Every structure is written in structure tokens, then in C-alpha cells.
Amino acid sequence: MNKPFPFYSEQTNQSFLQADMTKEERDAQLVVDKSILLFQKNRLMKLIDQSLENRNQKEFEQLTAQYNQLLQQYLHVANL
């Protein structure tokens, strides 16, 4: 499966849950994860808007699927 976000680490959610991390490491991971979430969320929202303007349904569906996947991957920081 292709990663929709090339710099997304599949370890993010798992590393956040590791018991051997210090509080500072968990806090740092949260900051990184929140930054990635906001950047990718804004990027995808712009692309979704463009696909709507261009009336490109296939692209819209692909981008909204990526957007929903992003939100699922970063549930642990979505409401911070």
C-alpha cells in the first residue's frame, strides 16, 4: 500500500503509546504529530477545494479518503 504522506512514520501512533517513553518524549511526539496533522490537513483541504472547483469527482473522492485516513491516524492529537 502506498503511503499518502511520504514523510509519515507508521511508528507515530505506536511510539506514542510506548511505555518506555519519558513524559518529555511523549510531549515532543505530540508536538510533531500535531504539526504534521495541521500541515497535511491544510494541504488536503486546499486540494479538495481545487477538485471541487474543477468538478473532478474522482480526485475529490481520493482526496477525501486521504483526509479521512489522516484524521484516523492522528486521532490522539486531533482535539489538542
Image (tube, rainbow, N blue to C red):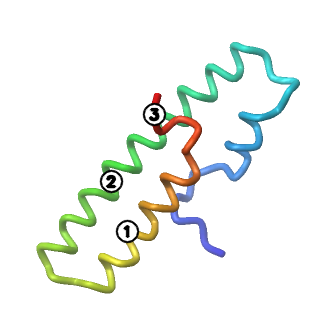
Instruction: Please rate how many residues cluster around mark 2, counting C-alpha atoms within 10 Å: few if below 14, some from 14 to 19, many from 20.
Output: few
Judged from the image, the secondary structure of the residue bearing numbered disc 2 is: helix
Q: How far apart are marks 1 and 2 (CA)?
A: 12 Å
Mark 3 burial class by Cα count in 10 Å: few <14, some 14-19, many 20+ = few
Residue depth check, mark 2 versus mark 3: number of the one nearer the observer: 3
Secondary structure beneath dot 3 equals loop
Residue matched to label 3: 79
The image shows residue 58 at horizontal and vertical percentages of: 32, 86
Is 44 situated left or right of 56 in this image? right
Q: What element carries label 1?
A: helix
Quadrant of the image containing the N terminus: bottom right
Which residue has dot 1 on it?
64
Using residue 73 as the reference point, say whether residue 49 is left or right of it: left
With 64 as the anchor, is 17 left or right in this view? Answer: right
Above or below, 78 against 23 in this view is below
Earlier in the chain: of badge 1 and badge 2, it is: 2
Crowding near the residue tagged with mark 1, few <14, some 14–19, many ≥20 C-alpha atoms within 10 Å: some
| Residue 38 picture location, percent across and down | 39, 40
Residue bearing the label numbered 2: 43
Q: Which amino acid, by three-letter code, is at mark 3? A: Asn
Spatial distance from mark 3 to mark 1, Cα to Cα? 20 Å
Looking at the image, which residue is at 76% across and 43% down?
A: 14
Vertical arrangement, residue 65 with respect to residue 78, above or below: below
Q: Are the residues flagged by discs 2 and 3 in contact, CB closer than 8 Å? A: no
Identity of the amino acid at label 2? Arg
